[in-house]
Image: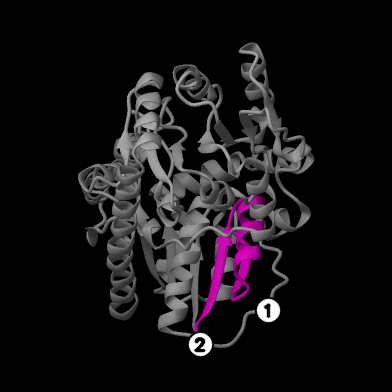
Amino acid sequence: MFLFFYNFILLSFSIFILSFFLLRLIFSKENIQSISEKFCLINKKRPKGEIIWINGVSIGEAKSGLTIANEILRISPNTTILFSTSTISAYKEIKKMNKQVILVFLPVDFNFLVKKFVNYWDPSFAFFMESEIWPNIIKELSRTRCKFIILNGRMSDKSFFWWIKFNLLTKEIFKQISFCATQDEISKERFKKLGTTNVRSAGNIKYLSSKLLVDNKKFIELERKIKTKDIITFFSTHKNEEKILIECSKHLKNSFKDLFFIIVPRHMKNLNTIVKNLEIEDLSYSIRSKNNLEKNHNFYIANTFGELGLFFKLSKISIVGGSFNKTGGHNPIEVSHFNSAVIFGPNMQNFKEIKEKILTTKSGIQVKNSKQLADKIAYFLKNETKRKKIIKNFKKLQILEAKKSSLLIQNIYRKL
């Protein structure tokens, strides 16, 4: 019954959906290839043998999905991985990082498109990352007896509110999920209430993520210019969140003369806002893409893609963006591969389980405001031994959780 209404609504709004994709094409959010593949114009050949389908929508989810792909290929080298994503940025990132997968765009969830996609590729397993519930995809995979598995499952407050509201109709969809490994207990209970029977709280698979790549030539070049400074990176910042760092710098300027703050915005459209906020306070800054770094600059706006590992490697301290506003924080795990102490703000609800493990193992610090942030930065800069201890603890945590995740993937793959 639910699928009937769901497909009726999709068809009713099909003209608006097509218009939406056309607008995205005009504004370069899509390209001809992405549109073609999303509407199932397939031009890639299916190889013989078993295919495992992995889907990761955004860059973060795609990276987690690639981690799963690497684990499966390690267990079963002759398996073919079909990797789907939804954004051009994630597609480019995966294409750059892995040559062993067949990379495609996820089809739009029209039943006739999904049916064509599933019939053509005929996967044996489908691993979807985090919170991707597409009714027609789940239905078609169930029809072909392909196991549908959610890894790193997360059910947000908003998503749960809407799914549970119509659960009498949607329960049939959630029952068709073969297995769901959630990030936390809250998500586990929510998936169970929605009808998924085989659910387990398994921690966060992002601990398995590989170390971010660093271009050594770029590292040497940038380090030469700022090697005498104490470098602090504020990464994945949201609009106006840099104000926290600006306030923090005021508290620190009398005690530390050679501080250098790197701001890595989550969205490049916020560049002008960051510049405006720095200029209001008459602070010296440079922009990475303009290559205009001077010795007297104390702020550096990193408005480039794929260089986060470079900034983590340079930094003594890394601060999690999205944790000082209502966003709910971003993934801090990637910092654990570098010699950088991690600090996050009061709002880490998107990564609550990770936050608790970091605090419990003394692998990082949580602060409430700019004053506390300044105090902790000062503490780490004055106490190298304490800073190194925090870093060591985070590395230990990452290794331990990565081993657990690796065993989980092996068990799922072998048993299902």
Q: Quadrant of the C terminus?
A: bottom left
- Give the magenta part as a residue range: 78-106
Q: Determine crowd level at label 2: few under 14, some 14-19, many 20+ residues with C-alpha closer than 10 A.
A: few
Q: Would residue 162 be seen by someone viewing this image from the given angle?
A: no
Residue 146 figure quarter: bottom left
Magenta span contains residue 180: no
Q: Secondary structure at mark 2?
A: loop
Q: In this view of the protein, which residue sits in the foreground, 389 or 277?
A: 389
Q: Position of residue 16 (x, y in %)?
A: 66, 37
Magenta span contains residue 83: yes
Q: Identify residue for label 2.
A: 78
Residue found at the far top of this picture: 280
Q: Would residue 380 be seen by someone viewing this image from the given angle?
A: yes
The residue shown at (52%, 32%) is 237
Labels 2 and 1: the sequence-earlier one: 1
Q: Identify residue for label 1.
A: 45
Q: Position of residue 392 (x, y in %)?
A: 32, 54
**Callout 1, which amino acid?**
Lys
Question: What is the number of callouts on the image?
Answer: 2
Q: In this view of the protein, which residue sits in the foreground, 3 or 150?
A: 150
Asked if residue 402 lies left or right of residue 107, the reply is: left
Marks 2 and 1 sit apart, C-alpha to C-alpha, by 17 Å
The residue shown at (55%, 47%) is 314
